[in-house]
């Protein structure tokens, strides 16, 4: 493998470990064994685990940013945008009952290096900013009816979705997530389970 391929594989494996175990429940040795390289080799790419964690969140921000940009480019109806956004969370659960990367890291907040915390907060701010814009557009078009400011609603949505993932993951029951979403979005728009399932198409 090339150096770029090795670095990407290290990040992929580390992300899986974070999403299924938590940041503090794996070591460089665990990653090295899965990738098939020496533990010391990982230090070439990421001198410390904190730098690996920061790189994970930075990469995640890029991927989410690209996904949100695609939604903006492909959808004009704020309701469709919101439904597709929700599907991003659901699709994560569908892959081995994984938790959102940032949600898992947030659970380890008190033990994380500040560089990871800073990147983590920026990631949540990215979500809040995008949701705020979508909700504001929905209010202007009459698609949404909000009982609070768009910014406050955006914060409620991201917090509720993360919480819904945690509970659904604990029971290994994605229906719990879908039920929460229907209740959450029902205050804004009527979204059926079928719409959630098909919103990515």
Image: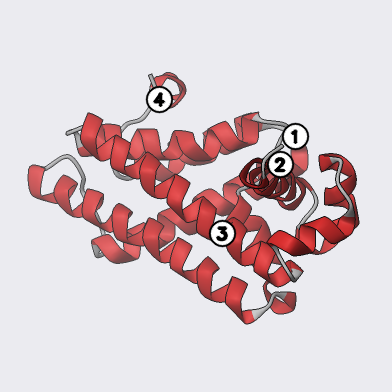
Q: Secondary structure at mark 3?
A: helix
Camera-nearest residue between 91 and 56: 56
- Which color scheme does this rendered protein use? secondary structure
In front of the other: label 1 or label 3? 3
Residue in the image at 44% along x and 51% along y: 62
Q: Identify whether 102 is placed above or below 166.
A: below
Q: Earlier in the sequence, mark 3 or mark 2?
A: 3
For the residues marked 2 and 4, what is the alpha-carbon distance in whole angstroms? 21 Å
Residue pointed to by mark 2: 169
For the residues marked 4 and 1, what is the alpha-carbon distance in whole angstroms? 22 Å
In front of the other: label 4 or label 1? 4
Residue in the image at 21% along x and 48% along y: 145
Residue pointed to by mark 1: 172
Q: Secondary structure at mark 2?
A: helix
For the residues marked 1 and 2, what is the alpha-carbon distance in whole angstroms? 5 Å
Packing grade of label 1 (10 A; few <14, some 14-19, many >=20) is some
Camera-nearest residue between 81 and 183: 81
In front of the other: label 3 or label 4? 3
């Amino acid at each position: 493998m090339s150096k770029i391929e090795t670095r990407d594989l290290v990040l992929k494996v580390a992300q899986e470990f974070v999403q299924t175990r938590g940041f503090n429940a794996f070591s460089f040795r665990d990653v090295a064994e899965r990738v098939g390289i020496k533990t010391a080799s990982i230090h070439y790419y990421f001198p410390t685990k904190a730098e690996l964690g920061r790189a994970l969140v930075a990469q995640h921000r890029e991927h989410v940013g690209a996904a949100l940009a695609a939604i903006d480019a492909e959808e004009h109806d704020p309701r469709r945008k919101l439904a597709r956004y929700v599907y991003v969370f659901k699709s994560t659960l569908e892959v081995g009952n994984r938790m959102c990367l940032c949600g898992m890291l947030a659970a380890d907040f008190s033990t994380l290096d500040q560089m990871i915390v800073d990147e983590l907060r920026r990631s949540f701010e990215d979500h809040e900013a995008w949701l705020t814009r979508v909700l504001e557009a929905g209010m202007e078009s009459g698609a949404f009816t909000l009982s609070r400011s768009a910014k406050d609603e955006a914060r409620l949505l991201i917090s509720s979705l993360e919480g819904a993932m945690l509970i659904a993951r604990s029971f290994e029951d994605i229906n719990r997530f879908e039920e929460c979403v229907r209740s959450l979005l029902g205050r804004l728009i009527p979204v059926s389970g079928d719409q959630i399932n098909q919103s990515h198409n």
